[in-house]
Amino acid sequence: MNANELRDKTPDELKEALATLKKESFNLRFQQATGQLESTSRMRGARREAAMVKTILNEKAAAAASEA
């Protein structure tokens, strides 16, 4: 997902995406600990995507606060 796609989503959809990314990150860490992880680059990608979602959620919250 790129930032433009994420900005088109509602805050509820972003929260769902964040929860999904957190679960994926947990599963990847578990796989790494047990030696089953094949693609270590996906761990970095999941962390970065979660950070992007959090950033956009904060942008939306700041925009909503400034309008009120």
Image: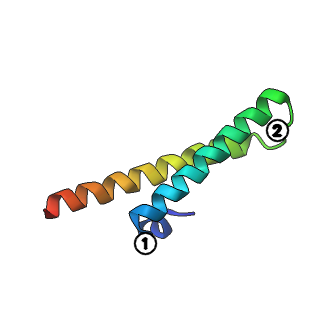
Q: Are marks 1 and 2 in contact (CB under 8 Å)?
A: no
Which is more toward the observer, 29 or 19? 19
Q: Residue 54 at what x, y percent from top left?
A: 43, 49
Q: Earlier in the sequence, mark 1 or mark 2?
A: 1
What residue occupies the far top of the structure in this picture? 33
Image quadrant where one finds the C terminus? bottom left
Instruction: Give the labeled residue for mark 1.
Output: 8
The three-letter amino acid code for the residue at tag 1 is Asp
Q: Is residue 25 above or below residue 30?
A: below
Q: Residue 26 at what x, y percent from top left?
A: 66, 38
Question: What is the number of the mark on residue 45?
Answer: none
Q: Is residue 23 above or below residue 66?
A: above
Left or right: 25 as drawn, with respect to 40: left
Which is more toward the observer, 3 or 62? 62
Q: CA distance from mark 1 to mark 2?
A: 33 Å
Say which element carries label 2: loop
Q: Residue 44 at what x, y percent from top left?
A: 64, 42
Q: Is residue 49 above or below residue 67?
A: above
Q: Residue at x 75, y 39 (%)?
A: 40
Q: Residue 61 at what x, y percent from top left?
A: 28, 56
Q: Is residue 17 visible?
A: yes
Q: Looking at the image, what colour scheme do you see?
A: rainbow
The three-letter amino acid code for the residue at tag 2 is Leu
Image quadrant where one finds the N terminus? bottom right
Say which element carries label 1: loop
Q: Is residue 49 visible?
A: no
Q: Residue at x 46, y 68 (%)?
A: 4
Which is more toward the observer, 40 or 63? 63
Question: What is the number of the mark on residue 37?
Answer: 2
Q: Residue at x 71, y 46 (%)?
A: 42
